[in-house]
Amino acid sequence: MTSPTIVQEDQIAVVVCHLNIWRKAIQSYRRDHGQWPGWNEPDAFVGQITGCTNNKGEVGNGKAYTFGPYLDGTDLPINPITETSDVLVVEEWPGQDAGKNAWVYNCHNGEFRVNSTGITTDGEKIFNF
């Protein structure tokens, strides 16, 4: 068994900042639609956060698509630990890091976490942030 990697303070600061960006976007979507993004179609999550949606959460352009985008810019926030930005959307929480994706999002309860087995210098698991 390998020991967890200690994550540097500057990386932790970026993780916390990016988690706040993601979580604010997810909460804003829920406020506008009454549901978590991806709740009925998990593969739609990234499009619903980065694009414009109608009141049903469908992604598109035009007058009917008045909500969003919920993230500024075209790039997803990068996880400085994995140096990637992809999101694993799950319907059941894995309880620990889940593979190589940068982020993990539960489309049934809106929980969003960094996907890392790393720990702080104090031994706190980054996944639990």
Image (spheres, grey):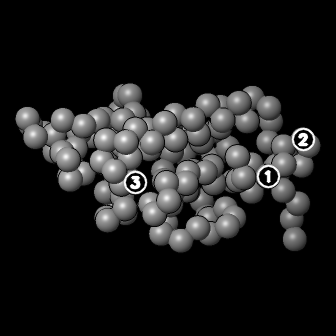
Identify the residue at horizontal 65%, vertical 37% (top origin): 15
Please indicate whether residue 29 sits to the left or right of residue 87 in the image: left
Closer to viewer: mark 3 or mark 1: 3
Q: Is residue 26 above or below residue 91?
A: above
Q: Which label's residue is closer to the chain start, 3 or 1?
A: 3
Identify the residue at horizontal 60%, vertical 59% (top origin): 100
Closer to viewer: mark 3 or mark 2: 3
Give the labeled residue for mark 1: 125
Q: Point out residue 119 in the picture as x, y percentages from the top left corner.
A: 82, 49
Pointer 1 local density, CA inside 10 Å: few below 14, some 14–19, many at least 20: some
Label 3 – label 1 distance at C-alpha: 26 Å
- Give the total number of marks visible in the rendering: 3
Q: Amino acid at mark 3?
A: Trp
Please indicate whether residue 44 sits to the left or right of residue 9 in the image: left
Q: Which mark is residue 36?
A: 3
Q: Looking at this rendering, what residue extends furthest in the right direction?
A: 122
Q: Secondary structure at mark 1?
A: loop
Q: Amino acid at mark 1?
A: Lys
Pointer 3 local density, CA inside 10 Å: few below 14, some 14–19, many at least 20: many
Q: Amino acid at mark 2?
A: Thr
Pointer 2 local density, CA inside 10 Å: few below 14, some 14–19, many at least 20: few
Q: Secondary structure at mark 2?
A: loop
Q: Is residue 62 above or below residue 102?
A: above
Q: Secondary structure at mark 3?
A: loop
Label 2 – label 1 distance at C-alpha: 10 Å
Identify the residue at horizontal 36%, vertical 54% (top origin): 35
Q: Point out residue 40 in the picture as x, y percentages from the top left corner.
A: 32, 65
Give the labeled residue for mark 2: 121
